[in-house]
Image: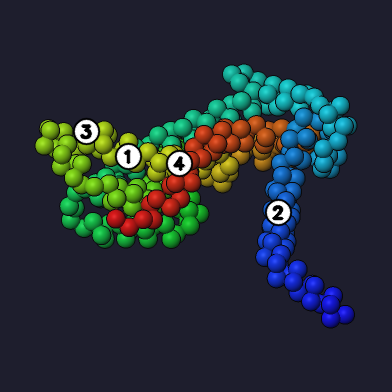
Amino acid sequence: MDQKQSSLRKFLDRYGHYVKKAVGYTLTHIWLLVWVFIVLTPIWYMVSSAFSGVRRLRDGPLAPTLDTLRSFTLDNYREVFTYRSGTGQALPDYPAAFLTTLFIATITTILVVILSSLVGFAFTRFRIRGKKPSLLFMLGLQMFPSFMGMIAIFLLFRVFGWLNNPFYLSLIYVAGAIPFNTFIVRGFMRNVPKSLDEAAAIDGATNLQIMIKIIVPLAAPIMGFIAVNAFMAPWLDFILPSIVMPNNETVAMWLVRMNDPATTPFEPILFMAGAMFIAVPVMMVQIYMQKYITYGLTAGAEKG
């Protein structure tokens, strides 16, 4: 018995470190695989349901099977992209809603990047009277939920005749995004040496030229991070578009209508087809701008 215990003790003394490392490695990967399964299962369910021939959501396959491949069809997408709820429409319902949302997201992204850059540059490079109170005021605005202003926004849109206009809706997203993004841009631009500005000014560059040709290229990662956030915001926002654009659908409004049997002749399974196609532009932007997102999450927090 003592001999066995001594042999076991020798084994643990010699290989115990490797055993602990192997057990920890195995448990870590099991834990990661569990979370991968949790994350990918609804994605697979959406994809398989969108391309399957089933007509009810509960019949969609939860796991990859041969029957899933055999039932592959594009019928759901044919219905989604050709259905018109009314006569005289230039485009079917879903393509029109998709293009409207894409227009709003594009305008929002462009304006947020431009205005946040200008405001952030001004706060970091100029001596402005009341700079600190202005920053604190902008930060304080972020403490109030956006729902508080929706009634006022609706009344303003109705008075000025801006209802059902995607451009004016994008301005609301821009106004809501500038305060937060200004803090991020300001934190990043403070790390850019002012000696670069001074060298360019000696060569005759104006402040606008300094910002466009020197500061913005150096701040490309944070600009990419801001652009991704601004682009994603309008895609799945339902409440604000439904208030200020009741007669001009976005994709989120279309998805909600698809789940109401009283307003659409479609089966609920077509909700999956539309939802998957909505995810395509957001996913493409996320993949393309991933390096900017990773860097931008921490760059604005650095103290210069």
- 242 vs 20, left or right, is left
Residue 199 seen in the figure: yes
Q: Residues within 10 Å of mark 3 (few under 14, many from 20)?
A: some
- In the displayed structure, 245 sits above or below 76; it is below
How far is mark 1 from mark 3, CA to CA? 14 Å
Which residue position is annotated with label 3? 209
Which residue position is annotated with label 4? 292
Nearer the observer: mark 1 or 3; the answer is 1
| Quadrant in the picture for the C terminus | bottom left
Pick the residue in front: 122 or 242. Answer: 122
Which residue position is annotated with label 2? 29
Query: Mark 2 vs mark 1: which is more N-terminal?
Result: 2
Query: Mark 2 vs mark 3: which is more N-terminal?
Result: 2
Nearer the observer: mark 3 or 4; the answer is 4
Query: Mark 1 vs mark 3: which is more N-terminal?
Result: 3
Query: Mark 2 vs mark 4: which is more N-terminal?
Result: 2
Q: Residues within 10 Å of mark 2 (few under 14, many from 20)?
A: few
Element at label 4: helix
How far is mark 4 from mark 1, CA to CA? 12 Å
Q: Report the amino acid beneath label 1.
A: Leu
Which residue position is annotated with label 1? 218
The residue lying at 76 percent from left, 27 percent from top is: 76
Q: Report the amino acid beneath label 4.
A: Tyr
How far is mark 2 from mark 1, CA to CA? 38 Å
Nearer the observer: mark 2 or 3; the answer is 2
Query: Mark 3 vs mark 4: which is more N-terminal?
Result: 3
